[in-house]
Amino acid sequence: MKLFFRKYASPPDRPGEGRPLIVLHGLFGQSDNWNSLGKRFAAASLQVYLVDQRNHGLSPHSEEWSYEAMTGDLLRLMDDQGLAKAILLGHSMGGKSAMHFALHHCERVAGLIVADIAPKKYPASSDTVIEALLSADLDRLKSRKEVEDHLARFITDQATRQFLLKNLYWKEEGRLAWRFNLGVLSKHRHTVGDTFDTENKSCAAPALFLRGGRSEYILDADEPLIKRLFPDAKLKTIAGAGHWLHADKPEEFFREVMDFIA
């Protein structure tokens, strides 16, 4: 699949493009969520690709949604862009996509940055969100405010509601729609939490695993598995950050990423 992406490179007063950095968003996310950080990475002389993964954002929809499929999509993007190697940065589902790619195409990975996710199976955590989205009848709800009020009946956290509402757009006059492929994401909702085949696989590329101090997605007990699959991995914690650590602590997140790349 040919993915939509946003590219940011060095400003005109700093000619030349540095090492490519590909950023992969999480479930229900999109490349637009990473614009601010993407521009900062580009200003630091990186060649930045903010990618919409399949069934998200402006990328095509498909009945197939798996880490194998997303790895194939990323490989095509790199081939199309002439990128022999790239630094991969992925958050949550995007982190799993990046890990899966690295374990199958390590020779294409210059560095791996995984934000608040481990290479393990997680229990379903998006069921409430998906049920709330499925129950939102967009043929009946005629404004963003009406959709938000409906979601508030199921989702108490305002930040989560606002994150989801960024995917809402006017498909045609008087008719709202979601950017993500809700039907497929609902049907294959457990895919995002699943692990993948890691037997006899590893990638020796330099790796950084960042976790939020207020998050429980990466536990101390996960470090041996991380080190087995990615022997050159370092695990760091951003104090005070939750699962969306890049949004909670953008300055600290930016510094950790740039220190790793340097």
Image (cartoon, rainbow, N blue to C red):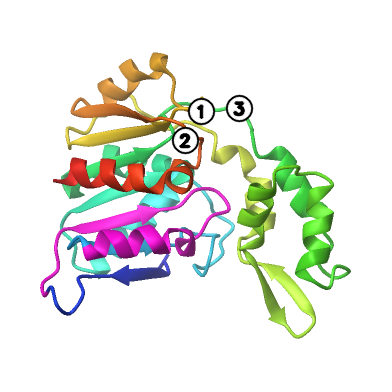
- Residue 214: mark: 1
Asked if residue 206 is positioned above or below residue 178 in the image, the reply reads above
Residue behind mark 2: 241
In magenta segment, residue 19:
yes
Disc number for residue 2: none
Dot 1 lies on which element? loop
- 197 lies above or below 172: above
Residue 23 spot, x, y in % from top left = 35, 55
| Amino acid at the residue labelled 1 | Arg
Is label 3 or label 1 in front? 1
Q: Amino acid at mark 2?
A: Ala
In space, the residues marked 3 and 2 are separated at their CA atoms by: 21 Å
Mark 2 crowdedness (10 Å alpha carbons): few <14, some 14-19, many ≥20? many
Do the residues bearing badges 2 and 1 touch, measured as CB atoms within 8 Å? Answer: yes
Q: Position of residue 48 (x, y in %)?
A: 28, 63
The answer to whether residue 49 is visible is no
**How far apart are labels 3 and 1 at the CA level?**
18 Å
Q: CA distance from mark 2 to mark 1?
A: 6 Å
Could you say which is closer to the camera, residue 215 or residue 4? Answer: 215
The disc, 3 or 2, on the residue closer to the chain's N-terminal end is 3
Q: Is residue 138 visible?
A: yes
Taking the spot 68% from the left edge, 47% from the top edge, the residue there is 187
